[in-house]
Image (tube, rainbow, N blue to C red):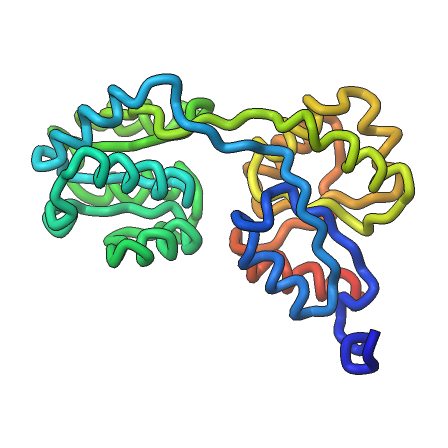
């Protein structure tokens, strides 16, 4: 290690990132810029829905949509895959209010030259609902391509407000059981300072991998969370959250990690 690397605030720290390196590239770069070693072993695998039919139907009816809600980069990727597969005209999005749950989703939209009209300050379903209820959502056609296990909150609240909402499944999340041995060895050897979780599913799946064995495996390894919903999931499983940033972004999480170890 060079002297310049050794002087960085997270130098010598090792963190488990529970996404693939492809998905977590921005986060890994932020950690490495602070001197940390990021080890990517996903606890979540993104796969297509069992049937593309419901999403394809909604994509073909896009000219009738008033509001498009996207709540993850995975949702963005799936939506545009089907848009192009169905040879739908991307220009229709200019007449649609496009909602991105947060900066990462908005950035994913930018890759398709689409700028989100709404990015709520609270990067969650509650924030999206609050923003949309500032206007007249009653009678509006809303398209919400979602994860199979998405919370029903957004759909329920917008329907209560009178919206005509379609929520076809855009992707599913599975537990990549084949990664459990690698994670077990990292934890058994006390090789990690902390595990970083970017969604509730990433922790749910870690618990699914190890069950009660997880508590013993963790030892002194800390649990860092991207935001309150993920933290809530971790605590509901009976574990403690050591760190959660004030803002729900990767940049804020890395900044919080720097401050944590500096203190």
* Viewport quadrant of the N terminus: bottom right
Residue 250 screen position, x and y as percent: 56, 56
Q: Is residue 203 left or right of residue 239?
A: left
Q: Nearer the viewer, residue 155 or 96?
A: 96
Q: Is residue 24 left or right of residue 36?
A: left
Vertical arrangement, residue 134 with respect to residue 1, above or below: above
* Residue 126 visible at all: no
- Quick one: 247 or 1, which is closer to the camera? 1
Q: Residue at 41% across / 27% down in the picture?
A: 48
**Residue 177 visible to the viewer:** yes
The answer to which of 161 and 59 lies nearer the viewer is 59
Depth check: 229 or 19 in front? Answer: 19
* Left or right of 249, for residue 166: left
Q: At 61% across and 64% down in the image, what residue appears?
A: 30
Residue at position x 66%, y 60% from top? 256
Q: Residue furthest bottom?
A: 3
Determine which quarter of the picture holds residue 135.
top left
């Amino acid at each position: 290690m060079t002297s310049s690397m050794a002087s960085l605030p997270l130098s010598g720290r090792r963190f488990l990132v529970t996404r693939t390196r492809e998905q977590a590239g921005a986060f890994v770069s932020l950690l490495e810029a602070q001197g940390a070693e990021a080890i990517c072993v996903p606890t979540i695998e993104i796969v297509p829905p069992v049937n593309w039919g419901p999403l394809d139907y909604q994509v073909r009816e896009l000219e009738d949509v008033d509001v498009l809600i996207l709540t993850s980069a995975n949702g963005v990727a799936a939506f545009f895959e089907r848009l192009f597969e169905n040879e739908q005209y991307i220009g229709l999005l200019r007449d649609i209010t496009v909602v991105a749950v947060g900066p990462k989703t908005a950035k994913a939209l930018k890759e398709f030259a689409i700028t989100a009209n709404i990015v709520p300050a609270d990067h969650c379903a509650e924030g999206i609902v609050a923003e949309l209820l500032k206007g007249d959502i009653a009678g509006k056609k809303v398209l919400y391509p979602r994860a199979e296990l998405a919370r029903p909150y957004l759909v329920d609240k917008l329907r209560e407000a009178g919206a005509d909402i379609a929520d076809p499944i855009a992707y599913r999340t599975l537990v990549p059981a084949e990664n459990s041995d690698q994670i077990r060895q990292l934890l058994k050897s006390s090789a990690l300072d902390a595990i970083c979780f970017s969604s509730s599913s990433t922790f749910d799946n870690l618990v699914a991998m190890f069950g009660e064995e997880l508590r013993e495996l963790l030892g002194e390894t800390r649990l860092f969370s991207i935001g309150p919903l993920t933290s809530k999931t971790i605590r509901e499983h009976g574990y403690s959250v050591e760190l959660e940033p004030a803002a729900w972004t990767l940049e804020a999480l890395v900044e919080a990690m720097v401050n944590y170890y500096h203190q």
